[in-house]
């Protein structure tokens, strides 16, 4: 089986969790968003993918607009709310790619006009993952404001563990290339659903679990070969969708235009690169 079709243990586990059955002995296909299984059993791609031994989801700045004591709710939309409806779904996993139940997720974001409610709790709310480590957030696509690309803030905390503060981003946003806080590793998978949008993101917390794998030994050196029609990946290079590069001897295809930054190596950002 080639590298693109290999399944992580988490992918298989998510399929079993969504189906409410024990993990299957074998599951054919690539990295998958199991909770949106279609009729024929196929599943769309998920970003980011947690392979055993991956690093936890990265931290980002809290920003100036966080407020404690948000109401517990999964739906931030109220009657008369303006904006494109957005449903964000995902799982919270620990270091062994096992789901974390009762993990706290506290979301806050701007309204359709790019403004935060600093008096009340509009577009603010917290919730907890279920027994399968899953969460669902009903909200809108946040508006833009000066200096930032489109984003959603979140704090995630496993029971009795430190808080992860980070942000979630939308693909194909023009400001992604100019926002100094933006990080492609935090891109959600987003797709249209009629007039609304659906997004997905899985968090990996720094939570030790039974069976936590030993991180793979890193190798020194960068790209080692250039496939026909491709170039070696390099920081600072602007790549257009469809561009082909090689990194560490593996070929990759660019999924969306961007300028390469440190930490955005093709294996680390499946929202930007596909092996092949």
Image (tube, rainbow, N blue to C red):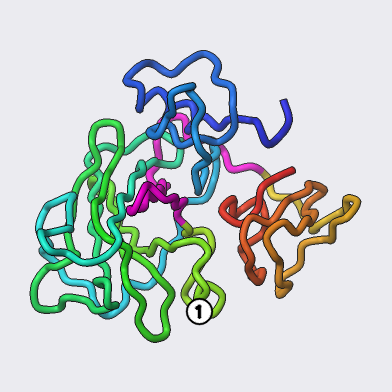
Q: Which residue is mark 1?
A: 180
| Mark 1: secondary structure | loop
Side of 60 where 107 appears, left or right: left
Give the quarter of the image for residue 53: top right
The answer to whether residue 206 is seen in the rendering is: no
In this rendering, the answer to whether 114 lies above or below 35 is below
Percent from the top left, x then y, of residue 28? 59, 22
Percent from the top left, x then y, of residue 265? 67, 59
The answer to whether residue 12 is seen in the rendering is: yes
In this rendering, the answer to whether 167 lies above or below 3 is below
Q: In front: 70, or 245?
A: 245
User: Quadrant where the N terminus lies?
Assistant: top right
Q: Residue at x 73, y 72 (%)?
A: 237
Q: Residues within 10 Å of mark 1 (few under 14, many from 20)?
A: few
Side of 242 where 175 appears, left or right: left
Q: Residue at x 30, y 38 (%)?
A: 134
């Amino acid at each position: 089986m080639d590298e693109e079709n290999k399944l992580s243990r988490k992918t298989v586990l998510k399929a079993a969790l969504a189906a409410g059955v024990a993990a299957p002995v074998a599951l054919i296909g690539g990295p998958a968003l199991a909770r949106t299984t279609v009729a024929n059993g196929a599943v769309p791609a998920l970003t980011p993918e947690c392979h055993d031994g991956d690093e936890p989801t990265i931290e980002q700045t809290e920003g100036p607009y966080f407020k404690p004591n948000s109401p517990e709710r999964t739906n931030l939309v109220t009657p008369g709310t303006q904006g494109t409806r957005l449903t964000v779904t995902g799982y919270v996993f620990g270091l062994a790619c096992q789901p974390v139940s009762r993990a706290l997720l506290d979301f806050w974001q701007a309204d359709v006009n790019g403004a935060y409610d600093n008096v009340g709790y509009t577009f603010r709310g917290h919730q907890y993952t279920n027994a399968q480590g899953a969460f669902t957030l009903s909200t809108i696509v946040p508006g833009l404001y000066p200096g930032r690309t489109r984003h959603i803030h979140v704090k995630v905390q496993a029971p009795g563990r430190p808080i992860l503060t980070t942000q979630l981003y939308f693909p194909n946003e023009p400001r992604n290339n100019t926002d100094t806080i933006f990080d492609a590793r935090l891109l959600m998978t987003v797709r249209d659903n009629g007039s609304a949008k659906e997004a997905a993101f899985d968090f990996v917390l720094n939570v030790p679990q039974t069976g936590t794998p030993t991180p793979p030994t890193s190798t020194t050196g960068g790209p080692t070969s250039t496939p026909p029609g491709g170039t070696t990946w390099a920081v600072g290079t602007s790549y257009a969708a469809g561009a082909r590069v090689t990194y560490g001897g593996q070929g990759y295809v660019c999924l969306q235009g961007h300028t390469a930054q440190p930490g955005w190596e093709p294996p680390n950002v499946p929202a930007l690169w596909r092996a092949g």
